[in-house]
Amino acid sequence: MRLNLTMRAVVLAAGLFAAIPAISQAATGGLPPGLAIHKSDEGLVLSKTDGAPLYRLDLDRLAKRLRGYADIMARCADTCPQYWRPVVAPAGFQPEGDWSLVQRGGEPILAYKGDPLYTFAGKSFDEIAARSVVPSFMTGYAGEPTVLADGVPAATLYWHLALYQPPAPKVTAPAGVATQWSKVAYVFADAAKHDLYVARSGRVCAGVCDGLKPLAAPLVADAVGDWRPLQDKSGARYWAYRGRIVYQVADAKAAEPGPEWQALEIR
């Protein structure tokens, strides 16, 4: 069985994003010693402080779902140790929040949201892509489809970058405004779960522009945390966040706003 590894996956898996500066410790909500976070196209990726990305394996998730897990692990016994090195927990580490410990061979292994973490110990992902490890019908977590053999998926990726999502911040916002995770940051969203936006250059639109419209505020609205109602000459009231007018999607079918707009991140 040959795994179908796309070029995009190779670039990410090889850790080429490591040249991007790590996210500050304050923004991560705290990490075990020896770990860092880097931005990638996939989101926030857990890594070692030397930039080596961390991974999770489908095998560990399958263990929670299938009784035949021992048979699967037997298939991996000779191959997995050559390529996947468990991340040993630092001395004195205490499980907390999304972080826990899994015992492997008498050693405490770091786990994030229940997934044991690994570094890649092989020479190349091309090499591991040619090794048969997981039956094709048991790999249901891949982000990429696989090649078909007689109409049946022949292989898929069973390893994935370990993506980090910090705990949701506690914020105060007007009624109808929520928060949601957007790959690399929490953002404000409207009741329909569409991101809210602000203009990068201080641009102001009274009506609909670029598929966005000002977020209306009730006539009796008062300030809520960093949110303030503003009123224009016509008497219309809009919400502003830290002095910037906030916009919402006017048409869900419209194209995504251009680069002059940015999602309203929670900072």
Image: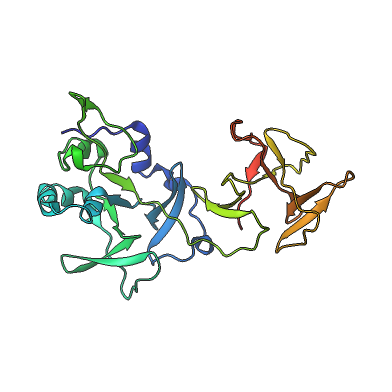
Quadrant for the N terminus, please: top left
Q: x, y percentage for residue 155?
A: 21, 34
Left or right of 195, for residue 63: left
Quadrant for the C terminus, please: bottom right
Residue sitting at the far right: 233
In this orientation, which residue lies closer to the viewer: 163 or 129?
163
Q: x, y percentage for residue 135?
A: 16, 40
Q: x, y percentage for residue 219?
A: 81, 54
Identity of the residue drawn at 17% across and 52% down: 81
Number of numbered callouts drawn: 0
Task: State how the image is colored.
Answer: rainbow
In this orientation, which residue lies closer to the viewer: 124 or 254?
254
Residue sitting at the far bottom: 92
Left or right of 204, for residue 255: left
**On the image, which quarter does residue 117 sit in?**
bottom left
Left or right of 47, for residue 109: left
Identity of the residue drawn at 86% across and 46% down: 232
In this orientation, which residue lies closer to the viewer: 45 or 82?
45
Q: x, y percentage for residue 23?
A: 50, 55
Identity of the residue drawn at 87% across and 47% down: 235
In this orientation, which residue lies closer to the viewer: 121 or 204?
204
Identity of the residue drawn at 25% across and 43% down: 158
